[in-house]
Amino acid sequence: DTEVTQTPKHLVMGMTNKKSLKCEQHMGHRAMYWYKQKAKKPPELMFVYSYEKLSINESVPSRFSPECPNSSLLNLHLHALQPEDSALYLCASRGPLLNTEAFFGQGTRLTVV
Amino acid sequence: DAKTTQPPSMDCAEGRAANLPCNHSTISGNEYVYWYRQIHSQGPQYIIHGLKNNETNEMASLIITEDRKSSTLILPHATLRDTAVYYCIVRVVNFGNEKLTFGTGTRLTIIP
């Protein structure tokens, strides 16, 4: 199983809503990532978790709150988002061996109205 | 992580080899070269990676110059399904503290 599964695939939320994005992998990977991708732009790193601990936060606004409850699961909690936060949110994971590749999920397409 | 420079777009005829260049002149000795591609609105897909030697797998070949300041991804027999944005990334392998930073990539269009 070399899959990273993201749910939901699409999400529409209002600016006052609270929602969560979910990412799951069963490859035993211990590094997990959240990226944000705007249309026609490359993915931008948001957060990195290593062994369930947050290791990198790329100065992401606090309305985005990551959580890694166990080694297989990564969540991104969303609260009070703005329309400009509408984007494709991608999750990735990587194994611990040297020079292994990262696997990406298919993303959640988020629209903030 | 070292910065990469790629042409913004390229065309290639179907069935021909597609050669995608990448400059990474500031690469350090412990940085690997990775290639990913992203087909419209899907998650990036790993293609190949290397450190010094040329590499080949079932998808592509990676040619790295001797000074490691540039590399070329070769898709040997391009098909329409290879139309995508191709990203060249260089990164230090520092597990759990690496950024895997994407550059602007090359939009490859395969022409029938």
Image (cartoon, helix red, strand yellow):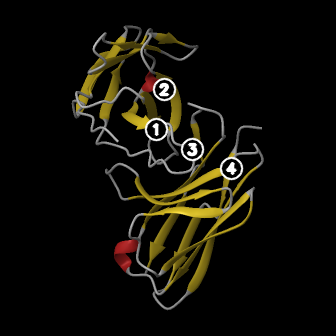
Secondary-structure class at tag 2: helix
Question: Mark 3, mark 1: which one is toward the viewer?
Answer: 3
Secondary-structure class at tag 1: loop
Secondary-structure class at tag 4: loop
Is A63 or B32 nearer to us in this picture?
B32
Q: Eyeballing the image, is A18 above or below A60?
A: below
x, y percent for residue A20? 62, 75
For the C terminus of chain B, the image quarter is top left
For the N terminus of chain B, the image quarter is top left
The quarter of the displayed image where residue A78 is located: bottom right
The numbered dot on residue B39 is 1
Earlier in the chain: of badge 3 and badge 2, it is 2
What's the distance in space between the residues labelled 2 and 1, CA to CA?
A: 9 Å
Is B50 or A12 nearer to us in this picture?
B50
Furthest-bottom residue in this view:
A16
The numbered dot on residue A74 is none
Q: Which residue is mark 3?
A: B95
Q: Eyeballing the image, is B88 above or below B62?
A: below
